[in-house]
Amino acid sequence: MTPIYITHLMKDARLLGAINKAQPFELVKRKEIYLYLYKSIMSQQLSTKVASVIFKRFMDLYKGTAPEPVEILNTPFDTLRSIGLSNAKTQYVQNVARFAITQGTEVGKFEGMSNEEIIEYLTRIKGVGRWTVEMLLMFTLGREDVFAVDDLGIQNAMIGIYKMRYTDKKKLKKRMLIISNNWKPYRTYACLHLWDWQNNLGKTAT
């Protein structure tokens, strides 16, 4: 049976060509909010391969077990730096741990909050930006209606699929948001199919 989100998204004739019906996506909910934020911070401006190596070194510091925030704060700064983190990223990881302890990042805290409320709440942490929280909403909290307008992969996919030629980034994003309104309430799935298209079919998009 075709997932309801695919039936809904296929109403967009342009997006229809980007949807791989043989590759339906299923969102997964996870509990380790702070762990995802650590990983996201560590991977900023790095290739997937390098980021994976650094995150593995991080986990190895705690024998492969997700460290509690207090364990992060009890880890010497230089020890965290030694796995390949910059001074800034080390501070950001500590910021997340400190915020988790003082303000809370448990899953239950977010259940009654809207996407925008969660973004506003978590971007109070220095080192955590809107894009990072949008990815968390999708891949950790399993929210179905998130649109990452600032994501380069999403931008390139939509430029290729909708033949948009904007030199003005602001105008491009405005047009993307208008188009994405037609995908509500399943914009996360639309993003997943756009990334899939970009990775597999849209590599020549400019």
Image (cartoon, rainbow, N blue to C red):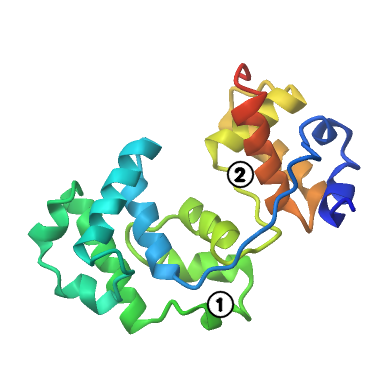
Please tell me which residue is depicted at 25% across the width and 57% down the height of the picture.
58
Mark 1 is surrounded, within 10 Å at the Cα level, by few (under 14), some (14 to 19) or many (20 or more) other residues, namely: some
Q: Locate residue 52 relative to residue 143 in the image: left or right.
A: left
Which secondary structure, mark 2? loop
Q: Position of residue 54 (x, y in %)?
A: 27, 48
Identify the amino acid type marked 1.
Answer: Phe
Q: Are marks 2 and 1 in contact (CB under 8 Å)?
A: no
Which secondary structure, mark 1? helix
Please tell me which residue is depicted at 35% across the width and 46% down the height of the picture.
43
Marker count (numbered): 2
What is the quadrant of residue 145 in the picture?
bottom right
Q: Nearer the viewer, residue 132 or 189?
A: 189
* Label disc, if present, on residue 149 of the rendered structure: 2
Residue 10 makes an appearance in the image: yes
Mark 2 is surrounded, within 10 Å at the Cα level, by few (under 14), some (14 to 19) or many (20 or more) other residues, namely: some
**Disc 2 from disc 1: Cα separation:** 22 Å
Identify the amino acid type marked 2.
Answer: Val
Q: Locate residue 197 relative to residue 56 in the image: left or right.
A: right
Q: Nearer the viewer, residue 11 or 130?
A: 11
Please tell me which residue is depicted at 76% across the width and 55% down the height of the picture.
186
Q: Position of residue 56 (x, y in %)?
A: 29, 52
In front of the other: label 2 or label 1? 1
Q: Position of residue 170 (x, y in %)?
A: 59, 36
* Label disc, if present, on residue 110 of the rendered structure: 1
* Label disc, if present, on residue 195 of the rendered structure: none
